[in-house]
Image (cartoon, rainbow, N blue to C red):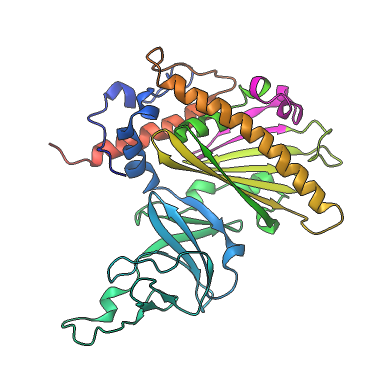
Amino acid sequence: MTASLPPAIPAADLAAHPVERAETIPSAWYTDARFAQADHDWIFTRTWQGIGHAAQVERPGSYFLAAIAGEPVIVVRGKDAVLRAFYNVCRHRGGPLALEDGCVNALQCRYHGWTYLLDGTLRGVPAMDRTELFDRKDFGLVPLRVETWEGLVFVNLAADAPPLAESVGGIAERIAPIRLGALTFARRVDYEVRCNWKVYVDNFLEGYHVPYVHPELAKLYDYTRYTTEVYDRYSLQHSPLTGDNLYSRDDGGEAFYYCIFPNFMLNILPGRLQTNLVLPVGHDRCRVIFQYFYDDVSGPGAAARIEEDLAYSDAVQQEDIGICERVQQGLASQAYDRGRFSVKYETGVHHFQELVRAAYREGMARRPSA
């Protein structure tokens, strides 16, 4: 990120209000590059990011790469079976330790060959024998906090952030007997969307638009019983399924749509989990990474059901991309600055925006005074 942070934000824009009286966040928070920098500094560097799955790092030496707030990250399973995360940055001159996912006995910089053990200890340093006052112990890899929950891997850049449990507590109990950790990974699909990441999250957090944007999706669940619940660091939208679709079981089943602040979604249907990770690419662009998990990936008819689910999901996603990109254009119009919330359908959007406001308040408080 290269833009400067926004100037002092008016106190009225940062004030919290109940959904019945609240206004939406100002349009500049979606369209001004300075607020994209605020999101980077005050939100993404301080929150848990769901970047992968434990199945990617089952064997000792296996690792995968990711990026968090522009920082290169490597997650690796040690020979002691411990999962660790480091910046994917050599301590010599900043070279990468890896360029793609893989499995190794040690991590070796792709620039000058410095070699690290899987616990981050510096082991091999070619042609450094004449360098004075050099101690390998001072140049180990820089670690990051990493935790797993229900088979999902989360990393946090902030050393002082609360534990992951505070962001996901109660979810596993609520969806029981469904066990997300028992599902098997099947597919990853990435989408590039020409809108601010907050536009995409706002859109996920309400069913208000479903009858107008997703007529086929509206048939999936009982819209009259669609309910939103908000918790400390996440919100839940849920509804019984209609019983006449790909996902329904003998008892119909239920759809659970969780959004873990700031940018990680769990779309839970019987026999299936879809995760969405929304990554800012610029103030008016984002990348959405979809990962699909199923209770059956190899049984009779499983492949056909998965392909049908992927096609259905893609159709819904294309509808969301279309409306989100048009909303981004509308937010940039001089005709719009801020709006109001539907108490019935947009409590999840209000909850998310209040968490954004809280992060901005904390960020402003941490800024050094002029």
Which image quadrant: the C terminus? Answer: top left
Quarter of the figure with residue 4 = top left
Asked if 41 appears above or below 63 in the picture, the reply is above
In this orientation, which residue lies closer to the viewer: 135 or 303? 303
* Total marks in image: 0
Write the residue at 35% across / 57% down. Answer: 159
Quarter of the figure with residue 122 = bottom left
Asked if 229 appears above or below 262 in the picture, the reply is above
Outermost residue toward the left in this view = 370
Quarter of the figure with residue 323 = top right
Whether residue 205 appears in this view of the structure is: no
The boundaries of the magenta stretch are 212-239
Rendering coords of residue 360 (x, y %): 33, 35
Asked if 135 appears above or below 368 in the picture, the reply is below
Asked whether, in this view, residue 255 is left or right of residue 349, the answer is: right
Asked whether, in this view, residue 354 is left or right of residue 223, the answer is: left
Whether residue 13 appears in this view of the structure is: yes
Rendering coords of residue 179 (x, y %): 69, 53
Write the residue at 30% across / 38% down. Answer: 362
Asked whether, in this view, residue 104 is left or right of residue 368, the answer is: right
In this orientation, which residue lies closer to the viewer: 91 or 109? 109
Write the residue at 49% across / 23% down. Answer: 327
Which image quadrant: the N terminus? Answer: top left
In this orientation, which residue lies closer to the viewer: 335 or 85? 335
Outermost residue toward the bottom in this view = 129
Outermost residue toward the top in this view = 335
Rendering coords of residue 306 (x, y %): 76, 48
Write the residue at 87% across / 56% down. Answer: 300
Rendering coords of residue 271 (x, y %): 75, 48
Residue 267 is one of the magenta-drawn residues: no
Asked if 149 appears above or below 103 in the picture, the reply is above
